[in-house]
Image (cartoon, helix red, strand yellow):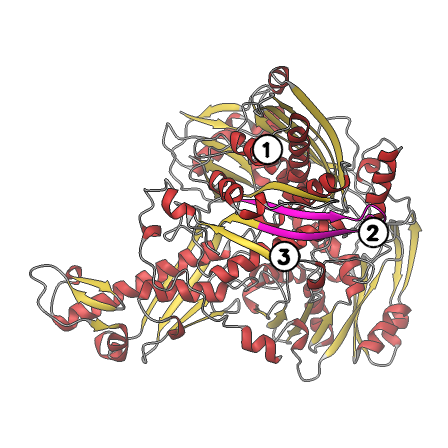
Amino acid sequence: MVKVVLWGSLRSATGGLTDVEVDAANTGELLKALVEKYPELESIIEEGVSVAIDGLIYKEAWFTPIKPDSEVVLMPYMKGG
Amino acid sequence: MVNEYVESKSDASDVTESKRDFKIVGTRPLRPDGIDKVTGRAMFGADMSAPGMLHGATLRSPHPHARILSIDVSKALALDGVKAVVTSKDFVKQDNSGNQDTLDNLMARDKVLYHGHAVAAVAAVNVDVANSAAKLIKVEYEILPHETDVDAAMLPGAPVLHEGRKFSSVPEGSSPNVSSYWEFGHGDVDEGFAKADIIVERSFKTAATHQGYIEPHACLATMGADGRGELWVCTQGHFMVRELAAAFNGIDASQLRVTASEIGGGFGGKTTVYLEPVAVALARKSGRPVKMVMTRDEVFRATGPTVSSSTDVKIGMTKDGRITAGQAKLRYQGGAYPNITAMLGAMTAFAAYDLDAVQTLAWNVLTNRPKQAAYRAPGAPMAIYTVESVIDEMCQKLDLDPLEVRLLNAARKGTKSSYGPTFDEIGLVATLEAAKAHPHYAAPLGPNQGRGVSCGFWFNFAGNTSVSIAVSPDGTVAVTEGNPDIGGSRASISMMAAEELGIPYDKVRTIVADTNSIGFNDVTDGSRVTFSVGLATIKAARAAIKNMCGRAAMVWGIDPDAVEWKDGAAVPTGHNAGNFPPMTLAEIARDAGKTGGPIAGHFEANADGAGVSFGVHLVDIEVDPETGFTKVLRYTVFQDAGKAIHPAYVEGQMQGGAVQGIGWALNEEYIYGDDGILQNAGFLDYRIPVASDLPMIDAVILEIPNPGHPYGVRGVGETGIVPPLAAVANGVSHAAGVRMAELPMSPPRILAAIDGAKG
């Protein structure tokens, strides 16, 4: 199981939780598992998200490996100027 | 200057490559685009022409908010010299809501949502005829009430721009104008505030500011009867232009070849489309090339400024300067369509600090203003301005040194950031220490003078990138990339290619290719290019090197693994490799046809590993208490570049960011009348700083290597605009003896504050 930290305003989609656990070995599996467990996250994930793994931010990458003890943070999709 | 501090004290010992003995990286060769630009040979957006070319003009809304009841183009089409007219009906409806917003913004569909919103466009034989024809288009409007203020637009009863556009996270009961709501942080802020010896809570406002690029938007489109088109455009991302212009016109992206011109500034403002899909539509309809060039008035009224903001900040601190909790409530308006800038503000507000308890809440609010566009570190300057202002006030109240307090609370490796992830190697502490040790910090101040300090932060991004390297038979090298050069990237990319290949810098030329000549590339934004394109260039060069080592091995009749690349040549390595003299790149290139054909290397990836960047700014300001006039006396920027590939360009980015931030702090603002019309749509009334307003901005580059890049590079393009707002505000507050809470701090506002303090 991987522990995933969500940003605060997502708690309305997870029954009040911002720390959740899912089975996933990479980022694609992670996003899929989150939607399966919390269907209200689907539209948010489809709008675009990033995943930070051990401090590094990955945008739109499905096959980035996740270790069971990795720090995983779901983040909004971001862009700069 | 490059600060020596980090070279001796950085603890990034695991980053071995970034400590290698660079020969080219870190030097300051002449800029490759310099001669073209100073001689006028450089081709910008409006410089291109084509035989039979028409000129486009846009009809824009005279109302800030109105329903379009009908559009009659018959009189315009009847005017002699008019070849085509387009309205929203000529474009393809989009499935993606973000793309539909972009399309609706460049050509209003059912409603006009701000003064200057495009309603129709004309192509005619010259600009005068096109403008005359635009005036002949008859639009019937139902005028609706409007709102341009962020706080007022959130109130019950405010005019509603769109129904049903809010994100799922927006709390029930919010105004329909609240399109998104975000929340970040960790820990219990109530517990944190309970531990504080002092709590300061303040409210701030910042005005919308424009990116202020010198070159207005411009393009030239052709679209043949065979469905194949060409587009020449001034943009930060010609692949993005291709995707959107093709989608909006219902054509295949590969049939529209887009070439990026030289660019006269972008700063984030050219990361979207305005004219380009319209020019393609007019070209297709008329069967002739169509050039469109915005006036400065159009740039101000219809292209993205950044957001304006209204923010409440609360910070708790112990008597010795430790922050116990931080909270910010940010309300941003970014015009008539949803955006993510408030979210970025909420993520960055407290990013410089190592906090046990932090909470940021953000609302994006729709108003009757132009659709905001990115502007250097979008969302961060105004958020960090509020936090850094309150911290400065607390230092003042507690009689603590502002740099010492920042050092005490600074984020460092292992800090859980306020937006979630834990930081790896970061340079904030080194940057603060460099500022503290700099002579500027100890220099004496005169009467009516004050010194301001602020930290700044930006994420930096990476993304989709393609690079190709071709070794020519004469031993020179062509690098092909696909990101418009807005800050010296062609020089930096050539330097990294030369460094890796072991050849002189002047043997490499880097070009930005059109969309049909290189793989896809994300927009030049997010301070990503020197990082991402540089990384791809290094890997493409390594692919070419592997190829060349293989050729040498073939010639020598040894195993390819027994060949290594050293100082621009293949050399045998190991006991059994033989005693062959080095075979240079030029020698291998010369005989390439005999050893297997042309030599090239390429690399394509969705890059990751961009390292965050911190900066610290010091500014000395003098305030005239009689007039409120401010003068910036001295300004020093300290910023972590990871590794400065071309230090002069890095300094330029730091200086440019500081200058734009100074303008934001002191003078720049979108001023709206009660009629919802922008009152200062020109550089005479929208005052950006010019060289004579400012001292030389001193730049001190720190180099704390980014573990995610082979040379340690971090993006540097955006962080520099983040600290100036608070640094200048803090300086003004100390100089004038009053604390300001609204930007810009124009002379009338400062004078009013001084007079108000006198009672």
The residue at the point 77 percent across, 65 percent down is B296
Gap between marks 3 and 1, in whole Å? Answer: 34 Å
Q: Crowding at label 3, few (<14), some or many (≥20) Cα neighbours within 10 Å?
A: many
**Is residue B276 positioned above or below B476 on the image?**
above
Determine which quarter of the picture holds residue B470. Answer: bottom left
Residue B451 in the image, given as x and y percentages of width and height: 66, 43
Q: Which residue is mark 1?
A: B401
Tag in front: 3 or 2: 3
The residue at the point 51 percent across, 53 percent down is B528
Quarter of the C terminus of chain B within the rendering: top right
Closer to the camera in the image, B628 or B510: B628
Residue B28 in the image, given as x and y percentages of width and height: 45, 65
Gap between marks 3 and 2, in whole Å? Answer: 23 Å
**Is residue B432 positioned above or below B273 on the image?**
above
Q: In the rendering, which numbered label is found on residue B267?
A: 3
Label 3 and label 1 in one chain: yes
Label 1 and label 2 in one chain: yes
Q: Which residue is mark 2?
A: B114
Residue span colored magenta: B613-636
The residue at the point 59 percent across, 72 percent down is B228
The residue at the point 64 percent across, 52 percent down is B634
Closer to the camera in the image, B75 or B516: B516
Tag in front: 1 or 2: 1
Kindly identify the amino acid type of the residue bearing the numbered disc 2. Tyr
> Can residue B438 be seen at all in this image of the molecule?
yes
Name the magenta segment's main secondary structure.
Answer: strand
Kindly identify the amino acid type of the residue bearing the numbered disc 1. Asp
